[in-house]
Image: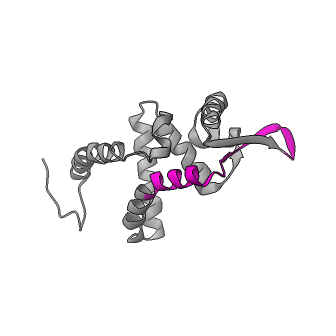
Amino acid sequence: MSTQRDPEVGLSTNDAIRAMLLLMPRVVARVKRTPLPERLRSLNLAPRHLTLLSNLLFDGEMTVNTLAERLEIAPTTVSLMVSDLSRQGVLERRGDPADRRRTIVAITDEPETRAAIEGWLANGAQAWHTAFEQLTDEERALFVRTIRTYEREASGTGE
């Protein structure tokens, strides 16, 4: 039975679960409705592309293996995604001057493409900024750990 505590003061575990089960579908639906910029519309981008592009935009160029670790997918899958986006002029790949066996991946220098990617991510980044700015560093870390735990447990693998 629900105790319906004031969410500004605290929530019981059951009330928090109820709130999140009602909220998450709305959040996902809103994210899915975020329109792609014109430059990116014909590219058939999936959520995994958003994560890949986010990593490159926020942290700069990196190797295929680093991207694979961050995306938690096989390097061959990342390589296929990178090849596809490279053919479409979104990403550039080049050999690592320090180790020619490694491939460095970066967002293209083409201004329209970079601006389109930044624009696509901007609304979500601003929403997170507004949500997180009211929290302490510890509260932000707790939130991120909580979402990671939820994602892991919801996957059914427990990994």
Asked if residue 116 lies in the magenta stretch, the reply is yes
Residue found at x 61% / y 50%: 56
Residue found at x 48% / y 68%: 137
Q: Is residue 146 above or below residue 78?
A: below
How many marks do you count on the picture? 0
Asked if residue 29 lies in the magenta stretch, the reply is no
Q: Is residue 105 above or below residue 137?
A: above
Residue 31: x %, y % from top left? 35, 46
Q: Is residue 46 visible?
A: no
Q: Is residue 76 visible?
A: yes
Residue 76: x %, y % from top left? 66, 28
**Which sits in the foreground, 59 or 133?**
59
**Which sits in the foreground, 13 or 34?**
34
Q: Which residues are magenta?
A: 97-122
Residue found at x 63% / y 35%: 82
Task: State the colouring used for the structure image.
Answer: one colour
Position of residue 26 in the picture relative to residue 31 (left or right): left
Q: Is residue 79 above or below residue 66?
A: above
Residue 18: x %, y % from top left? 21, 47
**Which sits in the foreground, 96 or 19?**
96
Position of residue 63 in the picture relative to residue 47 (left or right): right
Residue 7: x %, y % from top left? 22, 62
Residue found at x 27% / y 42%: 25
